[in-house]
Amino acid sequence: MCLAIPARITAIDPTGQSATVALGAVTRDCSLALIEDAAVGDYVLMHVGYALNRISPQEAQQTLALMREAGVLVDQDGPAPALADTAGPA
């Protein structure tokens, strides 16, 4: 099963084509090819290395809470397997 997960943009490369996103202590690079006008601090739904769309911080927190409740995401003290599964373009 594949899940898109909320992650926060922490940096955008100078070309604007890719970003670094964070979910807790885990960071990954992702493509911004599918969204426009992304900014540092935005929350995006990330899937297989692509930011699919921007979401509100409230929606991100609600989704993360539901994922924790369902057991597909662990607290920040442990690994975040869902983000590890999203490795894509680097």
Image (cartoon, rainbow, N blue to C red):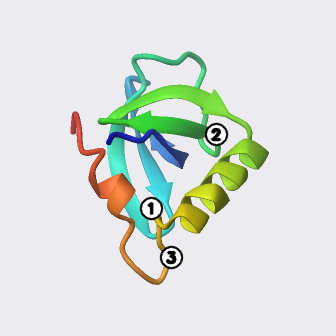
Q: Which residue is mark 2?
A: 42
> Which of the 4 quarters of the picture holds residue 1?
top left
> Which of the 4 quarters of the picture holds residue 34?
top left
* Among the two numbered marks 1 and 2 on one chain, the one whose residue lies closer to the N terminus: 2
Circle 1: residue type: Val
- Classify 10 Å Cα crowding around label 1: few (below 14), some (14-19), many (20 and above): few
Where, quadrant-wise, is the C terminus in this rendering? top left
Q: Nearer the viewer, mark 1 or mark 3?
A: 1
Q: Residue at x 45, y 70 (%)?
A: 25
Q: Secondary structure at mark 1?
A: loop
Q: Secondary structure at mark 3?
A: loop
Q: Position of residue 15 (x, y in %)?
A: 38, 23
Contact (CB < 8 A) between labels 2 and 3? no
Q: Residue at x 35, y 37 (%)?
A: 30
Q: Which residue is mark 1?
A: 72
Circle 2: residue type: Asp
- In the displayed structure, 87 sits above or below 80; it is above
Circle 3: residue type: Gln
Q: Which residue is mark 3?
A: 76
Closer to us: 16 or 83? 83
Q: Position of residue 68 (x, y in %)?
A: 56, 66
- Mark 1–mark 2 Cα distance, whole angstroms, equals 23 Å
Q: Residue at x 38, y 23 (%)?
A: 17
* Among the two numbered marks 2 and 3 on one chain, the one whose residue lies closer to the N terminus: 2
- In the displayed structure, 38 sits above or below 68; it is above
